[in-house]
Image (cartoon, grey):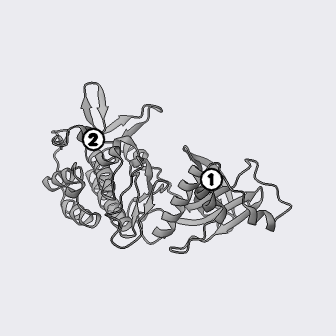
Amino acid sequence: MEQVYTLVREVGRGSYGVVFEGKSADRGERVAIKRLLCSSPESVELYLQEVRALQASGDSHPNVISLHRCLLQTAPKAFQPLRCSPGGTSLPLELVESTLKGKICPPQQCQRRRPSRRPPASGCAVLWLVMEFCEGGDLNQYLLSRPPNPSLHRSVLRQLSSALAFLHGRHIVHRDLKPDNVLVAASPTGPLFRVGDFGLSRISGGSSDTSRQSFSSTCGSEFYMAPEVWEGDYAAKADIFSLGVLFWAVLERITFLEEDSGRELLGAYLGQGSSLVPIGKALLKNPGRKLPIPLRARRPMHPELRTLLQDMLAFDPKHRPEALELELRVRQATAEDY
């Protein structure tokens, strides 16, 4: 790794991996490098889903994070490059086999090619994903460190609705849309908001499958989960609901404190006494409940945006717009200042 990239500092850590800021050895380009330890079949399955989604999305949309390179480490200094072009998956057979068998399979092919190499110190393979570096941090950090700015908020809506239309057009269902998974990069025309972290994503099989393919595993972050996700029977329009929660929080700067870390995070919710109830969970208990949009009456909201949020947060997925319709309606609703 050190022959190609230098790890500068750790910038993030989650349940499954660590993200570093890095530099390429040849040009000194800043990159984000995610280290994923292949220690269990469950973690390997998540990593392969992320790689597949990043490969499928390619680098053709400015609001979706790009994967530059993928490396499989099988020994302290043994790295096997994997092809990252769209449609050109070259995932290691031993990792795919691990997910199918439910146990970690050693990288035998790599060991045969390099018999003198010892396995990594962890005793299992490591995936390294090299992606573009977003110096603005995530959407929480970026927006909450600045005063409210309606023009910037409208830009967030336009860019993220465009990203989701692109992803659903590529048959990618994200399943974990939230401010933590939106990264911010600088550009000459202003900030670029980029959807990232595809560890929970799924890719549907055919041109008409994205809106029809259903999922049963309850996953995502509670404050952004659609009602049907709580029940374990949902499809792509759960992404529309999650984005609706995010949009509402951005437009009215609604925040909550994360229970474990105490961090202030963007996220809309409903109050129940002293408790904060996720919107999806509240609607599951009372499907006919009318959402108080806008939540803060002193902050006016464009009527088209209010109607759009209500449609995105509809209890019945059939009443939510498709991603392409959403992109069009967001552009129409944010075309004027208000």
**Residue 66 visible to an observer of this rendering:** no
Q: How many marks?
A: 2
Q: Residue at x 29, y 63 (%)?
A: 323
Q: Which quadrant would residue 125 be assigned to in this image?
A: bottom right
Which quadrant would the C terminus be assigned to in this image? bottom left
Q: Nearer the viewer, residue 158 or 95?
A: 95
Residue 98, position as x, y percentages in the image: 63, 57
Q: Residue at x 76, y 62 (%)?
A: 78
Q: Secondary structure at mark 1?
A: strand
**Residue 82 visible to an observer of this rendering:** yes
Residue 109, position as x, y percentages in the image: 74, 66
Residue beneath disc 2: 279
Which mark, residue 286? none
Q: Secondary structure at mark 2?
A: helix
Q: Residue at x 47, y 31 (%)?
A: 260
Residue 55, position as x, y percentages in the image: 51, 68
Residue beneath disc 1: 35
Residue farthest to the left?
303
